[in-house]
Amino acid sequence: MSKSTFFIIGQHAVIEALRNPKRKVLRVFLTEESKKNIHRKNPNNNLLKDIKVYFKTKKELDKYSNKENLLHQGYVAEIEHLETPVLKDFIKKKKEITLICLDGVTDPRNIGSLIRSAVSFDIDGIIVKERHFPHESKLMYKASSGAIEYMNIFQVSNINSTLKNLKDKNFWVYGFDQNGERDFTEIKWEGNNILLFGSEGMGMHQHTSKYADFSVKININKKIESLNISNSAAIVFHHIKNSKN
């Protein structure tokens, strides 16, 4: 049975999809210049081999991005979804795992930026609620700048039961909150950990926050109420990577 397809736009999003051997790319729509750029960036690997390529003007490609008011940069692709990884299988294969869990975070730009940072600093995977994850968002793919091709995204039906099951399997859950009890830099980031982030404004759901073993915060200037979630996440991911190294 064939999988559903959707469109992505932007140079990095399209090129990384073409580079990913696990990603099925059905068609690409390119300008003449963007095709040349793909070959310049990949001189030893013909990424367009066996791909249906259609040449379009920038104006013709605008119809794929006008609705979202995004810049396509001369790159559009129709792709299939990746196979969704299974969380219980993944945690059996690896030790010292660091996962992110997003509770109520739904903004595609923030999720895409967070994915980009997570890949940059070697986070192992992201847990999201399946029903709220914008899995076909052009904005999310563009904001991730192609990093989504390299991130394990675990789509679950229930965040709370997932956290409970992981705690039973020796994971520690750290809930990030501006009023957290400890600065996150005071933690020794060892073993299996889950970094739990709530939505901007609302924060973590009250019931979900009960599954956090520790409430931690990022110390910032008191004049500023909070950071954007993707900025907060990047700071945390960078620190954890450095502390492990």
Image: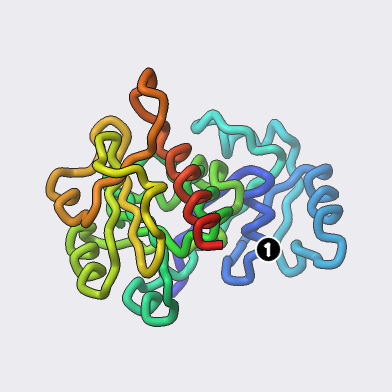
- Along the horizontal axis of the image, is 229 left or right of 47? left
Q: Is residue 37 above or below residue 160?
A: above
- Total residue callouts: 1
Q: Position of residue 105 (x, y in %)?
A: 33, 43
Give coordinates of residue 108: x percent, y percent: 43, 41
Q: Is residue 64 left or right of residue 90?
A: right
- Res 78 → quadrant: bottom right
Front residue of this view, candidates 213 and 188: 188
Image spot of residue 227 (x, y percent): 41, 31
* Picture residue at 37% right of the left edge, 75% below the top: 91
| Badge 1: residue crowd in 10 Å (few <14, some 14–19, many ≥20) | some
User: Of helix, strand and loop, which one carries label 1?
Assistant: helix
Which quadrant would residue 86 be assigned to in this image? bottom left
Q: Nearer the viewer, residue 117 or 193?
A: 193
Q: Nearer the viewer, residue 208 or 175?
A: 175
Tell me which amino acid carries mark 1: Arg
Task: Look at the image and tell me whether residue 185 can be seen.
Answer: yes
| Coloring scheme used | rainbow
Residue ID for mark 1: 19
Question: Could you say where residue 175 lies in the image, as x and y percent from the top left?
Answer: 27, 49
Name the quadrant of the N terminus.
bottom left
Tell me if I can see residue 109 in this picture: no
Q: For the point 49% across and 66% down, which residue is it?
A: 82
At x 73%, y 47%, the residue is 30
Q: Quadrant of residue 100?
A: bottom left
| Quadrant placement of the C terminus | bottom right
Residue at 41%, 68% (x, y): give it.
97
Task: Please state if 124 lies on the left or on the right of 39 as rendered.
Answer: left
In the image, 55 versus 8, the foreground residue is: 8
Residue 63 vs 125, above or below: the answer is above
The outermost residue toward the front is 186
Up the image or down, 57 lies above or below 18; here it is above
